Image (cartoon, grey):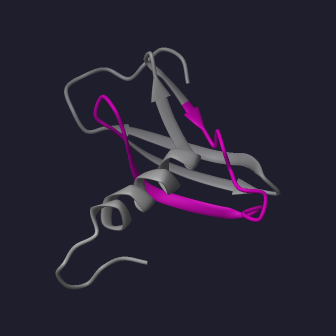
Amino acid sequence: MFEACPPFQNDADFGVPAAIAGRLLQRQDGVIDLLPALPSDSKDGAVTGLCARGGSKVEITWKNGRLVSAVMRSVSSDTLPDSL
């Protein structure tokens, strides 16, 4: 899926991971949405190190397609949004 040597395929090298991350986390207008487009075949899972706009790192765990836990850490001096 990812190109290991030139010529690089930017759509595969950067676009595919961004699309996968977008299915797990989105932030728009200061609101973070967790698991907005979770694929139906990904019933159980976890992800760490996702970066949200505004300087937050997020860890998410889900089971049976439903959010089990989420941890958000600010990695910048900005404050986290009031609503998640």
Quadrant of the image occupied by residue 57: top left
Q: Is residue 6 left or right of residue 69?
A: left
Q: Position of residue 21 (x, y in %)?
A: 48, 51
Q: Is residue 29 left or right of residue 39?
A: left
Residue beneath the point at 41% across and 52% down? 18
The reply to whether the magenta stretch includes residue 53 is yes
Residue beneath the point at 57% across and 31% down? 33
Q: Position of residue 23 (x, y in %)?
A: 58, 48
Q: Is residue 50 above or below residue 31?
A: below
- Quarter holding the C terminus is top right
Q: Position of residue 82 (x, y in %)?
A: 48, 14
**Identity of the residue furthest to the right in this view:** 64
**Magenta segment, which residues?**
33-56
- Quarter holding the N terminus is bottom left
Q: Nearer the viewer, residue 67 or 7?
A: 7
**Identity of the residue furthest to the bottom in this view:** 5
The reply to whether the magenta stretch includes residue 36 is yes
Q: Is residue 36 above or below residue 42?
A: above
Q: Position of residue 76 (x, y in %)?
A: 21, 32
Q: Is residue 53 above or below residue 66?
A: above
Residue beneath the point at 46% across and 29% down? 27
Q: Is residue 32 above or below residue 69?
A: above
Residue beneath the point at 42% across and 60% down? 17
Q: Nearer the viewer, residue 48 or 33?
A: 33
Q: Is residue 46 left or right of residue 44?
A: left
